[in-house]
Amino acid sequence: MRSGWHLASILLLLLGSAARAQEIITLTEKGGLHAAYVVPTDQFHRVDVQLIVLSGAYDDPNPSGTAHLTEHLAAFSADATVLRQPRERDIHATTYNVSTVYTNSGPPSDLEKLLRLSRAVLDPPRLPNGFAESEIDIVERETLLGERNAPRRWLRRTVLQSLYGTLRGRADNRVEDLPNLNLDTAYQFHTDHYVPSNVSLIVSGKVLATALNERGRPKIPDELNALLD
Ligand SMILES: [Zn+2]
């Protein structure tokens, strides 16, 4: 009997959670972006804005590591543009194999600033003299540290290189190419890949659930509409 009740309560729980599936609003007015989504939630008193460039390490030209260097330049340039200084905070971006994700988070009242920080990632990187060059050193150190912490990558790379018969793209040459990292190739990578049609935006957070439009659905905040115009 007891276990029967137990089973029933689990079923109710499952049914309940299925009924409360997370709402995801796909924006049709998306300002030339590949896609834009709003995910309203009441669970946290914060907003997260993710700008996803649909290019990553697999899109590396020669040398490998260019996508990663571009990520640093674009992130700090956005800081420099919006916050007036590039070292305001730690970098909130990650280069994956097929995407590069920039995340800006803050209280709901910061939404407008978070959106401007995200949008500025698409502007041509502008950094103080010497700053961009110093990021090459940082990317080199991050890469060497990452390789040391994940020794199996060496093995995987060797396998991929023999599989694809190439040193680039899916079978990158990350460590050997480090001395060749340069700003010109990174800026060109930015020009080629950091265009709105190659970018998706996800805005999730509490503030979005507080305002309802006339149909009772969460209202898209004016700040987001302004950004997408
Ligand atoms: Zn990095």
Image (cartoon, rainbow, N blue to C red):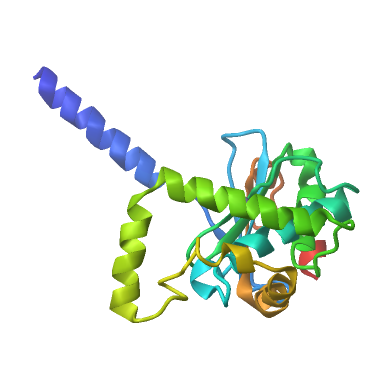
Tell me which residue sits at (34%, 81%) in the image: 165
Q: Is residue 65 above or below residue 213?
A: below
Asked if 162 appears above or below 50 in the picture, the reply is below
Q: Quadrant of residue 107?
A: top right
Instruction: Pinpoint residue 185: horizontal percent, then vertical percent.
Output: 69, 75
Could you tell whether 23 is left or right of 122 in the image? Answer: left
Residue located farthest toward the top when viewing the structure as drawn: 2
- Residue 119 at what x, y percent from top left? 76, 62
Residue placed most toward the observer, 19 or 113? 113
Residue 219 seen in the figure: no
**In this view, 45 is above or below 219:** above
Quarter of the C terminus within the rendering: bottom right
Q: Nearer the viewer, residue 11 or 129?
A: 129
Measuring from the top left, give residue 175's x and y in whole percent: 50, 60
Question: Outermost residue, left direction?
Answer: 1
Q: Residue at x 88, y 47 (%)?
A: 85
User: Along the horizontal axis of the image, is 224 left or right of 199?
Assistant: right
Q: Nearer the viewer, residue 31 or 210?
A: 31
Residue 75 is situated, as x and y percent measured from the top left of the image, at 73, 55
Q: Is residue 145 visible?
A: yes
Q: Is residue 48 left or right of residue 107?
A: left
Q: Quadrant of residue 166?
A: bottom left
* Quadrant housing the N terminus: top left
- Is residue 54 left or right of 70 when viewed as pictured? left
**Callout count:** 0
| x 36%, y 58%: residue | 154
